Amino acid sequence: MEIVIGENYEEMSKAAAAAMAKVVRDKPTAILGLATGSTPLGMYKELIRLHKEEGLDFSQVTTFNLDEYVGLSGDHEQSYRYFMTENLFKDINVNIDSTNVPPGISDDFKASCQAYEDKIQAAGGIDVQVLGIGSDGHIAFNEPSSSLASRTRLKTLTRQTIDDNARFFDNPTDVPVYCVTMGVGTILEAKKLILLAGGAGKADAVADAIEGPVSSMCTASALQLHPDSIFFIDTAAAGKLKMREYYQWVQDKKPGAPCWD
Ligand code: PGA
């Protein structure tokens, strides 16, 4: 695990965007795993800038999003499909037919979740997966007690997540209770993981994820099992890390270190 602590949200977002841009430049046909929420917005803004000002080309990429609310169609303003269109897809040259979001509406969720898994496999697997982290330590919507081997499936949101996300809805009672989410097992199969966290409200979850035991009670802790994961966090989100000075020391020593890509 690599821990990159930015001075502030903007620095963190730019560092994460640079890592994403490198994947796309190295492999123009990259399979990108994307996330919603307020945290990745700065990174998406920077990717849009890189596309517009530096010609970062998304024309051949394929994308898979982590999750979607059950019951919301793609044109609903709170759906994650809508979020992606508004905050990224409409401002870059991605082929919209190559963008995928889990099914929020289905007659047969078991079959449509399996189809989502199959589509990821058929595409060759995800090259880099972007993740946020919930204040309860969730990645995607893998709430505490989700199996670390879980696959794309229906989940029931916790009260805490519903309350956290109520800010996006006109009426707090409109927040859906159910979602479809990639599983922790699905996420761990991505070749590279990038987790973003900003603000003091995430400090406990970040500390549990990086320095706590691997546990289904903090599904972000499963990143400890992944061979290539990077946490891009700001100083506030880093506030409860015991080994923070060491993580900074590692970053300071990075230039000139042997074999560091
Ligand atoms: P946020 O959500 O970026 O809006 O804080 C993160 C998450 O719940 O994964």
Image (spheres, helix red, strand yellow):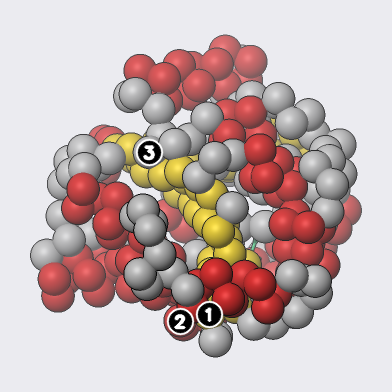
Q: Quick check: 3 above or below 106?
A: below
Label 1 to label 2, Cα distance in Å?
A: 5 Å
Instruction: Identify the residue position indicated by label 1 in the image.
Output: 6
Left or right relative to 57: residue 231? right
* Secondary element at image label 3: loop
Q: Quick check: 246 above or below 22?
A: below
Mark 3 or 1 closer to N-term?
1
Label 3 to label 1, Cα distance in Å?
A: 24 Å
* Secondary element at image label 2: helix
Mark 1 Cα-neighbour bin, 10 Å: few <14, some 14–19, many ≥20: many
Mark 2 or 3 closer to N-term?
2
Amino acid on which disc 1 is placed: Gly
Q: Residue at x 59, y 39 (%)?
A: 226
Residues at badges 3 and 1 in contact (C-beta under 8 Å)? no
Amino acid on which disc 3 is placed: Asp
Mark 1 or 2 closer to N-term?
1
Left or right relative to 32: residue 145? right
115 or 42, which lies in front?
A: 42
Q: Quick check: 26 above or below 117?
A: below
Q: Residue at x 65, y 45 (%)?
A: 223
Instruction: Identify the residue position indicated by label 3 in the image.
Output: 127
Instruction: Identify the residue position indicated by label 2 in the image.
Output: 11
Query: Based on the displayed image, in which of its 4 quarters is residue 243 positioned?
Result: bottom right
Q: Position of residue 62 (x, y in %)?
A: 29, 38
Which quadrant does the C terminus fall into? Answer: bottom left
